[in-house]
Image: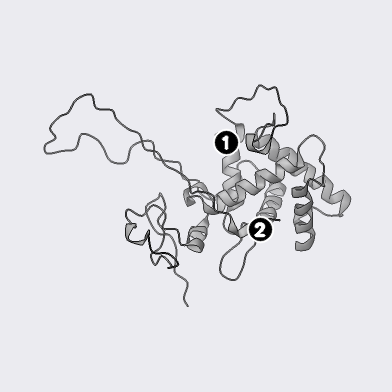
Amino acid sequence: MVNRRSFLISAAFWFAGSTSLTRASVVRDHMPWSPFPSSAPNDARPGPWQFFTANEARVVEALADRIIPPDSDTPGGKDAGCAVFIDRQLKGPYGSAAGLYQFGPYLKGTKEQGPQSELSPAELYRKGLAALDRYCKVSLGQAFDQLSADQQDNTLKKLEAGEIKFDGVDAQGFFDALLKDVPEGFFSDPIHGGNRDMVGWRMIGFPGIRYDYRDWVGRHNERYPHPPVSIAGRADWTPHKS
């Protein structure tokens, strides 16, 4: 498998609303706009699973921990909230493939053409998790989350290599979705449910949306010394004691 901790998928982007001015004007005493526009992003707060069943959630957490395993310095995908991130995304527009053409024809394309499946991401996960459960129980005697770490890794390697086939869903496509969504949850802004306590950003020294860090742009091989800041506007973490 590829080096799982080398992934860096860009943090979430936030685009505020814009206003077009048809003519120049003089501004006195007040600003002609209001701060904090109504297009602020929704905060994915902790709570019950919104898309996954309890059994599905346990498997996705186990998958996240094998794609981004924990080490002595950084939590893995499970404790970083990657399954929560995916759960919230699948419940929303991403899960239903909102805004994407979904009427076929469905032909197997090249990797560069992106997903060509008739299934939405939500359908891909639901069918993929059910098929993975059947495969693991028939071939290995237990659900994926109950397997040893070596068995889990071996199963993922076979999925990646196309050696495992699922009925009714593309097994390799399901693995590709996991390989994209888990790291995205690990490095997205914490308001989306993943990157809990900004562990992903702290691991790579990413400053988040700090107002100004130009002094550090050209300073290579130096650890950024300040805590990251999320869209929520604060640094929610406690420095580790050395």
Q: How is the image coloured?
A: one colour
Q: Secondary structure at mark 2?
A: helix
Give whichever of 177, 37 is nearer the camera: 177
In the picture, residue 208 is in which quadrant? bottom left
Identify whether 241 is placed above or below 173: below
Which residue is depicted at the point 29% across and 30% down? 19
Give the CA distance from mark 2 to mark 1. Answer: 23 Å
Q: Which mark is residue 135?
A: none
Seen in the image, is 99 located left or right of residue 144? left
Which residue is depicted at the point 41% across and 65% down? 224
Q: Secondary structure at mark 1?
A: helix
Report whether residue 15 is seen. Answer: yes
Identify whether 120 is placed above or below 128: above
Residue 169 in the image, given as x and y percentages of width and height: 76, 36
Q: Amino acid at mark 2?
A: Asp
Q: Mark 2 sits on what residue?
A: 65
Q: Which mark is residue 94?
A: 1
Answer whether labels 2 and 1 touch (C-beta < 8 Å): no
Report whether residue 53 is seen. Answer: no
Mark closer to the chain start, 2 or 1: 2
Seen in the image, is 213 located left or right of residue 63? left
Identify whether 92 is placed above or below 192: above
Residue 111 in the image, given as x and y percentages of width and height: 67, 38
Callout 1 crowding tier (Cα within 10 Å): few <14, some 14–19, many ≥20: some
Residue 150 in the image, given as x and y percentages of width and height: 78, 62
In the picture, residue 219 is in which quadrant? bottom left
